[in-house]
Image (spheres, grey):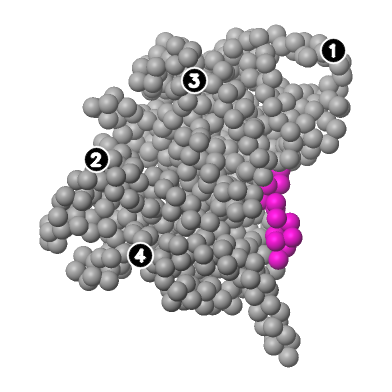
Amino acid sequence: MGKKSDTGENDAVFARRMSRHHDELRWLYMELYDNGAMFAELCDQMKRWYDGRKETLKRLDAKREKEETWYRRRDMLGMMMYIDNFAGTIKGVQEKLPYLEKCNVSYIHLMPFLDSPRGRSDGGYAVADFRRVKPELGTMEDLAALSEQCHKKGISLCMDFVMNHTSEDHEWAVKARQGDGEYRGRYFFYDDPSVPQEFEKTVPQVFPATAPGNFTFLPEQGSYVMTTFYPYQWDLNYRNPRVFNEMMYNFLYLANQGIDIIRIDAVPYIWKEPGTNCRNLPQVHTIVRMMRMIGEIVCPGVVLLGEVVMEPDKVAPYFGTVEKPECHMLYNVTTMATTWHTVATEDVRLLRKQMDTVCALPREYTFLNYLRCHDDIGWGLDYGALRAWGMQETPHKKYLNDYFQGKTEGSVSCGELYNEDKETGDARFCATTASMCGIERAGFEHDRQKMELAISKDIMLHAYMFTQSGIPMLYSGDEIGQVNDYTYREDPEKAADSRYIHRGRFDWALTDRIRSRDSVQGRLFNALSGLEKIRRREAVFSADAEVHTKDYSDLSILWIVRRAEGEELHAVFNFSSRVKKIWMPETAVYTDLLAEKTKEVTTVDLPAWGFMWMKRKK
Ligand code: GLC
């Protein structure tokens, strides 16, 4: 009896959600594919995935539908990690949840863990089977169990959905290689080199040094296959509705394992058109919008995080509009790169300009803020603005790369170039936060003073990240100042890809030192923990706060004001190695959130690479 009425209720919920989106979804689908039968199949399958969704997840969906902004709460703090580096297996991650709780983490991004061929995996971004976990990491059951445990603790799980391409070992690719036309049609196959040559004229290269070109020749087939990234990552052809439908079923399958946040990997690349740069084409937005609606119908508790590593005017459109949203969250990539530019130049003008651009966007737009992630830092800065201040693109990139490699006088950073393009002189950069801040070098040189500065810089940069609107995302190991790992050079499967320098094994021995307040690890861990708690507690950090930057007569001082609920935060950051005397806007009573002292303040001496969070009533 109970079961029957549950089914009835569930059907009604599905029907309600479907009726809300059906017309727009159908319209967009037909516009792209003009195929009613495939659309009908998609709708039937959506119901099937909905029916197969666990009751606990359905309850969570209902709760999150009511509290639409659940993922923007100021207690959201993310951490991204490789399962094997952090805890060996998925079960291991589950055992380590108490540590993550100690880190105040409420959102875990598990780096790619689906089946992927060894040595041809691009860190897991070449998926051979979307429904199978890499056997050495565990099983889908382990994942579902981890999600259940996380949900009990109020922690959300995020995973990558690598939808632009599959591994060449994926069942479809294997069949396509055997010449099966149905499967060849799921990729971009050309027997004649003329089309690939046409594409090459307008499509830039993602990995110019490690994987040049956008096509790979398959000698046994005598044909070319499109491979924008590595030759073993075959681009999927989303002109084919079978590809779209099947990939949506994979998305829903993963959502049903209890994943809360789906990171849509490399999303700008998913539509290809000869004569264009094959990035950010309008059809990409149609697909993301459809994906958003499909999610809202089947699993509205799931949030889409778009990976759009592009210039600012290309990023914001992936939020869609308030009426027709696409991604819930996007990476704040330009702010991240600009932050490091500011570290190297000790000049905050560009960072301020960047913050002003972000602050002018609607507050519904949620950014994911970060200092470092698993990828390199591409120097995607606003060169138009920099030119006006006398900095030219090519020499400036060289300056930044030299600086962070530690070649510039006064630089304390250590790291390596990535995908250096010998022809254009272009290069990106890889290292951990701690190494870029000088912790590695100071440790090596046993230089206490340098270490003090490096720790201050590292903490200040985290505080700056926490001050931005959106969700802060830590990179596992940064909370204990883990430095570069050079062992990748000895591993033939990794040696060519310097991103592995910051993908080292998590050093659990370092966590023993957290308790010692004098150790580097203790200093960092406890400082970050303190900041996270303040952020959680204080209304001025809420997503809806009004935020702006403030003019200050010193090029190295970045001043951010946040206002909410009758309070005002003055967050001031010293991006320089000199002590700075800061004049408050007026003599008034402030609460120093770090020192927990309330008193009248006129001036503050900010130490080198120091910062302050001063709150007042308004
Ligand atoms: C994304 C990932 C990157 C990967 C690429 C190809 O940009 O972050 O690590 O190489 O997609 O899947």
* Numbered-mark total: 4
Disc 4 target residue: 240
Q: Disc 4 vs disc 3: Cβ atoms closer than 8 Å?
A: no
Residue 418 x, y percent position in the rendering: 34, 33
Rendered image: mark on residue 385:
3
Sequence-wise, the earlier of marks 4 and 3 is 4
The span from disc 4 to disc 3 (Cα, nearest Å) is 42 Å
Q: Is residue 487 visible?
A: no
Q: Which residue is mark 1?
A: 587
Kindly check if marks 2 and 1 are in contact, taking CB atoms under 8 A apart as contact. no
Contact, mark 2 vs mark 4 (Cβ under 8 Å): no
Q: CA distance from mark 3 to mark 2?
A: 29 Å
Q: Which residues are magenta?
A: 62-75
Q: Tell me where residue 357 appears, x and y as whole percent.
A: 59, 30
In the drawing, what numbered circle is on residue 201? 2
Q: Residues within 10 Å of mark 2 (few under 14, many from 20)?
A: few
- Pick whichever of labels 1 and 4 is earlier in the sequence: 4
**Along the line of sight, the residue nearer the viewer: 421 or 445:** 421
Q: Where is the C terminus found, in terms of image quarters?
A: top right
Q: Tell which circle, 2 or 1, labels the residue nearer the N-terminal end.
A: 2
Q: What is the quadrant of residue 355 in the picture?
A: top right
Residue at point 41%, 48% (across, down): 281
Q: Hey, what amino acid is under mark 1?
A: Thr
The alpha-carbon separation of the residues under discs 2 and 1 comes to 61 Å
Task: Find residue 297 and report its image quarter.
Answer: bottom right
| Residue at the image point whose x is 47% and y is 18% from the top | 386
Residue that lies at the very extreme toward the bottom in this rendered image: 1
First-in-chain label (3 vs 1): 3
Badge 3 amino acid: Ala
Q: Nearer the viewer, mark 1 or mark 4?
A: 4
Label pair 1/4, CB-CB below 8 angstroms: no
